[in-house]
Amino acid sequence: MTDPVLRPFDQSLPMALMRAREATMRRFRPILSAHDLTEQQWRVLRALDQTAEALDVGDVAEATCLLGPSLSRILSNLEQRGLIRRRTDKHDQRKSLASLTAKGRRLVARIAPLSEEQYADLESIVGTDDLYRLFDLLERLIDTAPNADHESHELKESA
Amino acid sequence: MTDPVLRPFDQSLPMALMRAREATMRRFRPILSAHDLTEQQWRVLRALDQTAEALDVGDVAEATCLLGPSLSRILSNLEQRGLIRRRTDKHDQRKSLASLTAKGRRLVARIAPLSEEQYADLESIVGTDDLYRLFDLLERLIDTAPNADHESHELKESA
DNA sequence: ACAATTTGCCTAACATGTGAAGCAATGCCT
DNA sequence: AGGCATTGCTTCACATGTTAGGCAAATTGT
């Protein structure tokens, strides 16, 4: 029964997660900034590149882990640069649908191999097995979250 | 030999790290906002609470994983609120030394048990063993970083 | 049909992330 | 001592994180 002394930072999980992410991103950031893209802008372009059709803003937010206000600004930015396009959904006029332009798709295609190259390096250094172990542990951590809608898997079985 | 297609987000390590951190912080954020503190402000207070003496701004930046400009603003904020104190180092007048005020130390003491309670919950859910496994994997990831000064352990042995 | 509620996206305001530039204090060199 | 690059912190400018509030379209209840 010791006093409730605060654990030092080396034993803080959020801190370790942040440093790990920072260390990982250090590989990719130079590629992106060379193409005048931020991390977040790149995540949006990737999300849109993954589907043939357009996505509504809510889906993009979920996929990219961005909050509405940030995403709204990012979409405006990318739209002005001619990388994406926005139009309102005919069936629900509250929704705004986003999709890549040809220019945007070309940009993703140009960056993709560079990104995958870095990822391959990372995997070879850490080791494929340990990388999967890490993914599993992170996934478990995500599932312990109090009450977040991360596209709950739980409903499917109980429905 | 497939085309260099981009991996989906569920196989992206930076994405998994971000979601895991977000899920973890969801436990702590309510405690902090109830005391009008942001994550980052809390990290600074913690860092200063860990040492008896004052820390220079560079050390605080390293300990809290904050960049100079952010830290500079945060210190101004905390100083205005009377939670910390700043003075210039007599031996090197470029340096600015920060330390907690009595008020700041009381605030940390009030929050600490709440924070540790959440941490204990987390550990009991994830399991102590898996938590340590996770720390190990994250540490390895951090050490694969291209060229960052994370208080390199390497020098001590080779010196 | 109509009022109340909810949903989806937006803007506003403030705090932080990030790279570049400024500036004073220090260290180095001759 | 006098130049000169370096260090430590700050400020600036712009992009994002975060919470709150706004507005129009859709849904619900009657």
Image (tube, coloured by chain):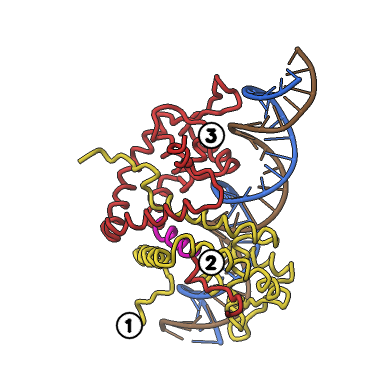
Chain colours: A yellow, B red, C blue, D brown
Disc 3 is placed on an element classified as: helix
Name the chain letter of the residue that bears numbered label 1.
A
Q: Height in image: B30 above or below C7?
A: above
Name the residue beneath numbered marker 2.
A120
Q: Say which residue appears at 41% left-offset and 45% top-offset.
A: B35
**Same chain check for tags 3 and 2:** no
- Residue A145 in view in this figure: no
- Kind of residue sitting beneath label 1: Glu
Q: Which residues are magenta?
A: B15-25
The x and y percentages for residue B125 are 28, 60
Q: Most extreme residue toward the left, as rendered? A: A1
Task: Give me the residue at 54% from left, 23% from top.
Answer: B89
Where A138 falls versus A14 (above or below)? Answer: below
Of residues A153 and D29, the one nearer the viewer is A153
Q: Earlier in the sequence, mark 1 or mark 2?
A: 2
Mark closer to the observer (1, 2): 2
Residue identifier under label 3: B57
Q: Residue furthest front?
A: B158
